[in-house]
Image: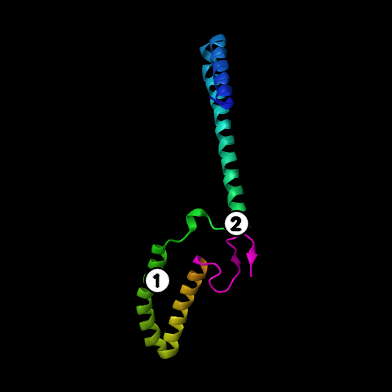
């Protein structure tokens, strides 16, 4: 039992003692008062938790790191590639049918562009950007 539980137990004991002394006519007021104190404790605990999570997210953003759940797995990359190829067929047909060769080239430029952005997002430093040294954590050019 920690200090907060001890304090809460003392509050409950005090409320029950006051009820015995004051009688049943004050019971609802005493219960409401005790529940208000519990609500304040819950609100305080939730507020502290939310502040801590927001601070952690801000620190991750400031460091430029991705959240632990945001890492892409091989399956997600493979799925993105498959969807990209499946959508390339109708886009090529529409681009080639409507705009002939320039339309086809435009459609494929868009497909390639989307895949390049996805590759750069999942593999920072893939296209000659700054890489983080695995040895000492300093940035290397």
Query: Which quarter of the rendering shows the C terminus?
Result: bottom right
Q: Is-magenta flag for residue 20?
A: no
Q: Which residue lies at the image location 64% right of the left edge and 61% below the top edge?
A: 138
Image quadrant where residue 43 sits: top right
State the image coordinates of residue 18 (x, y, percent, origin top left).
Answer: 57, 13
Position above or below: 71 against 83? above
Point out residue 86 in the picture as x, y percentages from the top left corner: 35, 74
Instruction: Please tell me how crowded label 1 is: few (under 14), some (14-19), or many (20+) other residues with Cα within 10 Å.
Output: some
Is residue 121 positioned above or below 113 on the image?
A: above
Q: Name the secondary structure under disc 1.
A: helix
Task: Find residue 61 and name its label.
Answer: 2
**Number of other residues with Cα within 10 Å of mark 2, as a class: few under 14, some 14 to 19, many 20 or more:** few
User: Which is nearer the eye, 2 or 99?
Assistant: 2
Residue that label 1 marks: 81
Q: What's the magenta region? A: 122-141
Cα separation between marks 1 and 2: 28 Å
Q: Main secondary structure of the magenta part?
A: loop
- Image coordinates of residue 135 in percent, x first then y, are 59, 60
């Amino acid at each position: 039992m920690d200090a907060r539980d001890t304090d809460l137990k003392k509050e409950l004991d005090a409320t029950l003692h006051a009820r015995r002394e004051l009688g049943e006519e004050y019971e609802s007021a005493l219960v409401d008062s005790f529940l208000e104190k519990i609500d304040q404790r819950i609100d305080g605990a939730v507020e502290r938790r939310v502040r801590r999570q927001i601070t952690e997210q801000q620190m991750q953003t400031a460091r430029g790191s991705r959240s632990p759940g945001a890492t892409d797995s091989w399956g997600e990359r493979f799925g993105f590639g498959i969807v990209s190829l499946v959508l390339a067929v109708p886009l090529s047909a529409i681009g080639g049918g409507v705009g002939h060769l320039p339309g086809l080239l435009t459609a494929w430029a868009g497909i390639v562009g989307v895949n390049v952005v996805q590759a750069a997002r999942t593999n920072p430093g893939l296209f000659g950007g700054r890489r983080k040294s695995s040895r000492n954590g300093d940035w290397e050019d």
